[in-house]
Image: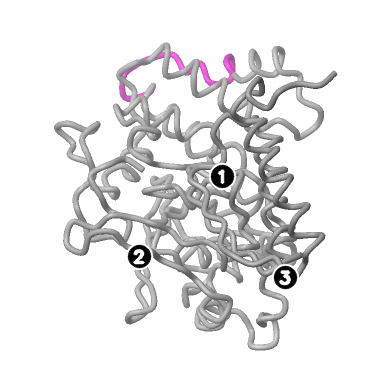
Amino acid sequence: YDIDIDELGEGNKSLLLFALLRSYAKNFKQDATGILAVEEPEIYLHPQARRYLFEIFFEIVRDSNIQVIYTTHSPDFLATERFDSIGLVSKSPANGTLVKTVSKEDLVEFSKQTGVPEDKTTLENISEFYATTSNYRLNEGFFAKTLFLVEGETEELCLPILFKHFGINPDSSGISFIAVNGKNQIPKYWRLFYSFGIRTKIIIDNDDDEDGNKRASNKNIASCFNTTIDEILDIEDEENIKVLHYENEDLFNQDIFVLKKDFETAFKEDYQKYCEEQSLDDKYKEIYDEANDLIKPVKNSQKGQLARYIVNRILSENPDYKPNFINTIIENLGFNQEDQASDMTNDEELNEDDFPF
């Protein structure tokens, strides 16, 4: 039945307007000109509709001479492979409002300067290079005040819990923990987000194999930061984390946290040491078995969910327990130890302002 436009919700009104504009662009093609400026197109739209509208914007640009400019707080209106269409807006106490863009030429050059062979990255393939592993979760990195790039789901699920246990709310502090699906992907996304001036930290495991994928990933890390595999892998027996700091003139200044073997091992050994020092029963095995019975993982799957359950249970039973390796990471961020929920120290980062994000 017919319905008046005024009876539609605000989201449907927006979609109808953009549908008409898309039709105009398709029919008049190059004769359709002008600038379409939109403020926060995500308002009133479900995630699926947001992503659909994002594609409509690119259809309009592709089929006409219309330029689309929009502001957004939604990762659904960004894509890592379309990085050259992003302008990251931030506020600086010294310089006011700043806009940071990264062109394909910029990222290709930075990639070559940080270990990518000359023949591996070009203007023609750089977007496709990011498109092959793109996902919606990665887009959140563009909105982070501090971005932690981690290998997998375990760190992504567990680190926010541990930060809150230390009195630091990652969301109110503008901190994101984003898994890139493997150590080998760390340099790729570090280059992208670091190029935008986003304060980026890296957490990796020191696991290795001499002839397999882990060794190749460690070589990739070493090549990117101009270091050696041995420096990445060597951790003292009594330690479960070490901090590496790399500088390359004016090119980059980067911290990397290396966990002993993997997150599960680092947490387990730290907890067992705590139990020994406090003369407490070590319940790790008991809680691990309990997690397995509840989650019922198939083979080696759902490691992240298992680890999250274990971390939650151990922290709930031991509210005074604060893992040393997490404390090392938090101290590196510059939080005031007397009031760890306070803001980070002002270190003149590009996206530093008075707001968490």
- Quadrant that contains the N terminus: top right
Q: Secondary structure at mark 2?
A: strand
Viewer-side residue, 233 vs 101: 101
Viewer-side residue, 354 vs 280: 354
Amino acid residing under circle 2: His
Q: Which residue range is magenta in the image? A: 276-287
Tell whether position 142 is magenta: no
Q: Look at mark 2 in the image and give the residue it sits on.
A: 245
- Going 47% across and 77% down the picture, which residue do you hit? 226
Left or right: 180, with 212 as reference point: left
Q: Give coordinates of residue 6: x percent, y percent.
A: 63, 24
Between tags 1 and 2, which lies in front? 1
Answer with the quarter of the image where residue 68 lies: bottom right
Viewer-side residue, 216 vs 99: 99
Tell whether position 278 is magenta: yes
Residue that protrudes farthest toward the bottom in the picture: 118
Q: Is residue 276 above or below residue 51?
A: above
Amino acid residing under circle 1: Pro
Q: Give coordinates of residue 50: x percent, y percent.
A: 65, 39
Between tags 1 and 3, which lies in front? 3
Mark drawn on residue 31: 3
For marks 1 and 3, the one nearer the N-term is 3
For marks 1 and 2, the one nearer the N-term is 1
Question: How far apart are the two marked residues, 1 and 3, measured between alpha carbons?
Answer: 32 Å
- Quadrant that contains the C terminus: top left
Residue that protrudes farthest toward the right in the picture: 1
Q: Look at mark 1 in the image and give the residue it sits on.
A: 75
Viewer-side residue, 319 vs 235: 319
Amino acid residing under circle 3: Asp
- Going 49% across and 63% down the picture, which residue do you hit? 232
Mark drawn on residue 165: none
